[in-house]
Image (cartoon, rainbow, N blue to C red):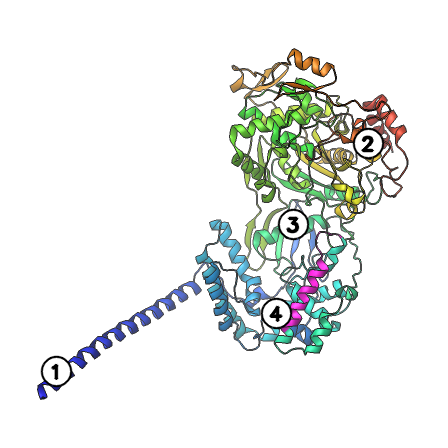
Amino acid sequence: MAKKVKQNTSKRRRKLDIWNKIAIVVLTCFLVGCISVFFILVNVINDPEGMRFSEDGLTTLSNSRIYDRDGNLMYEFGDEIREDVTYEQIPQNVIDAFLSIEDSRFFDHNGFDLPRFISAALTNLRTGDFSQGGSTLTMQMIDNAFTKNQEDKLLNTKGSISKLDQVKLKIQEIYLSLIAEQSIGKEEIFEYYVNRIWFGSGNNTRGIQKASQYFFGKDVSQLNLSEAAFLAGCINAPGQYNPLANMYDSEVDHLELAQERRNVTLQLMNQHGYISDNEYKLASSTDLSLALNYKEMTSTDPNEAFIDQAIAETISLTGQDPGIIPMDIYTTCNQAVQKQADEICAGNVVDFSRDEFDIGFSVIESETGEIIAVGPGRRYHTDAVKIDNSTDRKQPGSSMKPLLAYCSTFDLLGWSTEHAVNDKAKDYFHTGSNLNNSDGKYDGLMTLKRALGVSKNCPAAAAMVELVNEKGYDYWIDFCRKLGYSEDVCENFVEQYSIGGADMYASPIQQASAYTIFSNKGNRVNAHTVRKVIRRSDNQEVEGNTEEYELISEEAAFMMSYLLENVVTGGYQNLNEWLISPNYTAYGKSGTSDWGTDGLQYGIPAYTYKDEWSVGYTSEITIAVWSGFTAQYQKLGYYFSYAELMQGTAFQITHNLLDFCQDYYDYHDIEVPDGVSSYKGGYIKTEYLSKGDETNAKDESDEEKACKADGGEWDEESETCIKEEEEEPDTPEDPGTSTDPGTGTDPGTSTDPGTSTDPGTGTDPGTGTDPGTGGSSDQIGAMFLLDPRKFLLGIRNLIDIL
């Protein structure tokens, strides 16, 4: 019996020994894990390349300054940017609103809210990304002052931020938040936060006091519950939740979005016990528009638009806001040219047909990509929500032909400048109908030089189709990226882009930047307003984005410039002749887009003009000018009248700026590169000289010639003659319907503009009346048709004299 008890005891001991060993192993692993995590955290926190907390980094001891290209002070941030308020000046409903939506346990945690962070971490694990940060107000303060700069540093050194880097930054951010709460009080942290964030207020202003004045015309201490909830809720998307944006943007109801966001804040305030149910119901039912009290602020600074662009670029480069962090920003601005640009926008240089007519343009130094001046439009100094027409995108029309349809043919297809193209009817884009030219006719075989000079659509489309077949879509998507267009535009590339159709949209800055390849040996340097930024607290320097892209050969760039000089001086009786100067050689291309039938909903007649572009350059600078009406006025029925088209406003601006910049640049003819040879009165790349340039256009057959002679249209695919039913002799064809409504093509720049628009549908410019209802332009049209070139040159000379 004793032996049996002993055996049972021995078995129990063996079991205990096993469990003890397991416990020891688990405990050891746990301790090792804790020690490892501790050392990892210490290593991350003490990373010599990581962030360091400094109270100086939280306080703007001095203001940021912006300098022009010559080092002269242009602008210094001052009290007009930010007006700080103390914690005591901020009403309790504002504090409660911010705490409810941003950090409900702000006064309870030590800078790091563990429950909230764990909840965000679980969400991140479930979704597979790090979009949920669980940040406290203190952490957001650290993020604005330190983390964003560190992220920019990583982007500059590594090119991207990995998931591991994000984890390290978050650990450092938490640590600095803990240090910050030991160094400064909660009230100071709250002050710093609300005094430095952007609420969507205009003129680069920051902070809740400026926002209160901007939206409601009152001091922050006077804000009511509804207004406080709106301001607290709008900061995560200030542009989207700005109700004043409804004055200019009818695509989105910003007021409705702002009220919805305000109500979310009010709901959270009610949930956390800051307001009662009755207070919530009353405030959430209030119409926010009744509280708005915007007072127009007028600026007289001619550099305003350039400064705004430089600030935005600085934020992109550094990850920090110069309205908060003191910096010295060295820009590319030529203040004299910028002042001239401002004078043009003010109507002191070029006359505008009516008050609603608008413009937007940019001037870029071709070799460096430096933006030396911008024209944001005629209302930028007074707009509540700034719309900068130099950065706003429009359809560029036929100004795309040199960039996509033609310049690469010299490299990829071996074309010469005298290459024969066939202007013939064909469904190039597989839309179900033949592509039309703006003059409503097909001229058969012609030289590339003439096809570009009269801006034919069909040869450009045929060239683009051949280029796509040669290289594939991916090549041209990347080509558009290298030209500097927006990613959404590049991703949607189709052959219609070659004539400015489909989803091809560009801003004047983008279009001018793209055209720099022709005077910069086939290369484009990224367009930029900032040369360098120096952060004053530690003298850290960040260089501007001057990335360079190679698109075409130097030979192809010269050959394209040769053709574009001919567009200006070749006697094609188009508006590009405005660029002719006795003092220098100018190169250029026009572009227009029409409404098709899209404008009918606004009362705009079908196929009337929508936008007019002029792109001109010399050996040194490139200018792109857009003219037309902004969306605000388009929706009221405004469009180009015949007289406005004849005025050639965009071309006058290009000519004026090219002349003005002569004082700062030494213009000269673009030189013929060594790799180019003379060929049939034009040029060809020397590598293709021995092969020669065989045309890809076949001669017309007798049947095709007979068909056209009899007034028919030859269908290439079916090889049959198609004749339209004869119209009544007393019903003339509407010239304005000759443009393919689905192509967004140039309806008026490829031939005599007077032949492509009904001269009786326009408005006498300068009357300010609703377009399409004014007086007739028949007399002007008759004069133009007699001798269009003399007529255009006469107008230009008269304007120069005046």
Q: 785 or 582, which is in the foreground?
A: 785
Residue that carries the numbered disc 3 in the rendered image: 310
Q: In which quarter of the image is residue 78?
A: bottom right
Q: Distance of mark 2 from mark 1, alpha carbons?
A: 113 Å
Q: How far apart are marks 2 and 4 (CA)?
A: 56 Å
In the rendered structure, are the residues bearing label 1 and label 3 in contact, judged by CB atoms less than 8 Å apart?
A: no
Q: What element does badge 4 sit on?
A: helix
Q: Residue sitting at 64 percent across and 46 percent down?
A: 529
Residues shaded magenta: 248-268
Question: Residue at position x 71%, y 62% from top?
Answer: 79
Mark 2 in CB contact with mark 1 (< 8 angstroms): no
Q: Mark 2, mark 1: which one is toward the viewer?
A: 1
Q: Disc 4 versus disc 1: distance between alpha carbons? A: 67 Å
Mark 2 or mark 4, earlier in chain:
4
Sequence-wise, which precedes: disc 3 or disc 4?
4
Label 3 Cα neighbours within 10 Å, binned few <14 / some 14-19 / many ≥20: many
Quadrant occupied by the N terminus = bottom left
Q: Residue 297 carries which label?
A: none
Q: Badge 1 local density, few (<14 within 10 Å), some, or many (20+)? A: few
Three-letter code, disc 4: Ile
Which residue is denoted by mark 1 in the rendering? Answer: 7
Is residue 557 visible in this depiction of the protein?
Answer: no
- Residue 396: quarter of image: top right
Q: Do the residues labelled 3 and 2 touch (CB within 8 Å)?
A: no
Q: Name the residue under label 2.
A: 646
Q: Residue furthest front?
A: 725
* Amino acid type, mark 3: Ala
| Secondary structure mostly taken by the magenta-highlighted segment of the chain | helix
Decide if residue 114 is on the left or right side of residue 532: left
Picture coordinates of residue 787, whole percent (x, y) = 84, 21
